[in-house]
Amino acid sequence: MEASTPTPQQIAEFLGERVIRQREAVTELSVALAKKLAMLPVGNVLMIGGSGTGKTTLMHAVEGYLEANCTELLRPIVVRIHANVLGEEAQKGRPGETLLVRLLERAREVLGGMKPVEELLEHARRGIVFVDEIDKIRTHVGETTNTSGIRAQEALLTVMENEAVSFTLPGWAGGEVRNVDVSGLLFICAGAFEGLYDAVLERITVGKDQGSLKSVTVVEDGEFTQRMEFWLRDWLRQEDIFDYGIGPQFLARFDAMVLLDDLDADALAKIFTFAPDSGYRKAQAYFESRKTRLTLTEGAVTSIAREASKSPRLGARALGEVFRRVIRNYEFEPERFANENREIIIDTPDVEEGLRRAYSGGYR
């Protein structure tokens, strides 16, 4: 390995500054990326996490790392594609073609249109493919067969199995049919897998593994109580993924399956305060454009995060909805709320009042 090859720790430090609370996912992606940049064999990664837990943020962080630390000639080509698109293309009888065309066009965009097609193909076949909402290509939904999902899994499996894939080059690249060795591609697939949590919990409480989950004794306010504590990562089996509708052959193409943690109020508060694209940062930029400074007290941030944590299925996305209810009046009339120093300070009572008015239907 060359001395200039980044270590997983170096990559993790970069990713960890942009992603809150997902240490396991950051570690897996950092190791995979370090191997990729060292031109070593690397296994595909499957991320499972509810909406708003940071799957897309992780993908953006990886792209940001590559752009900041790799020259264009050494940077792996990165494309993102929705799993449903693969299903639609598979139904047209073009498995994998859309994916390869996107990789080739992205290589042309990064390296320039004057590069020879062979050079573009070489970069494309060693790229990184982010597949969003991989759970949407289930083989079945309940008792109903999902033909599109079956075909999409088969199409993606064809590309992931390290086989030469045949596809037609775009017109600008000559339009001929080529066989391309795609063994160098790295796939990072992610999905919310809605319903998986409930399915596993049902299996161990009232299903075939009934009685497996035992109560634990905890101390609350000085009193001992019995509580059932269920964590998906402790009970998830490959069979649960199969039952969900992800085929065994398809799942076998992933070396790592990572479960993202749900975000509690503390994590949401950090995201709201520090994430570059948080609603708080965007609002501050808006008020700066109006020659006004926006400040939220620690109590206000905590109140917003706690309210957002009441919608665990939305994860960090709940922050935006809660904050919108609080901030919209201030954005509408900044001059009404700003002090003599052109500063707006929002405290806990202001958050509580804003939420009360929003829930009661009042706008002003």
Image (cartoon, rainbow, N blue to C red):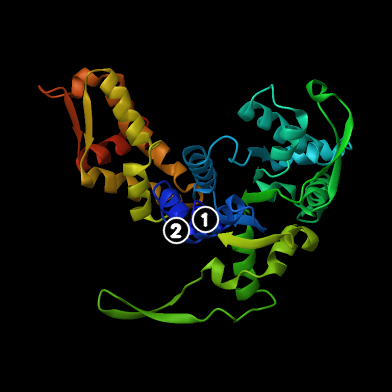
Rendered residue at 70%/36% (across/down): 103
Going from N to C along the chain, the mark reached first, 2 or 1, is 2
- Quarter-wise, where is residue 244 in the image? bottom right
Which residue lies under the disc numbered 1?
30
**Cα–Cα gap, marks 2 and 1:** 7 Å
| Residue 211 pos. (x, y %) | 60, 81
Asked if residue 264 lies left or right of residue 291, the reply is right
Location of the C terminus by quadrant is top left
Q: Nearer the viewer, residue 148 or 122?
A: 122
Q: Point out which mark residue 118 bears.
A: none
Whether residue 79 is visible: yes
Rendered residue at 86%/25% (across/down): 175
| Residue 183 pos. (x, y %) | 76, 51
Q: Nearer the viewer, residue 67 or 101?
A: 67
Kind of residue at badge 1 = Ser
- Quarter-wise, where is residue 2 in the image? bottom right
Kind of residue at badge 2 = Gln
Which residue lies under the disc numbered 2?
9
Q: Secondary structure at mark 1?
A: helix
Q: Nearer the viewer, residue 129 or 283?
A: 129
| Residue 62 pos. (x, y %) | 52, 45
Rendered residue at 33%/27% (across/down): 328
Rendered residue at 58%/40% (across/down): 75
Asked if residue 353 lies left or right of residue 256, the reply is left
Q: Secondary structure at mark 2?
A: helix
Residue 325 position (above or below residue 20): above
Asked if residue 115 lies left or right of residue 359, the reply is right
Count of picture labels: 2
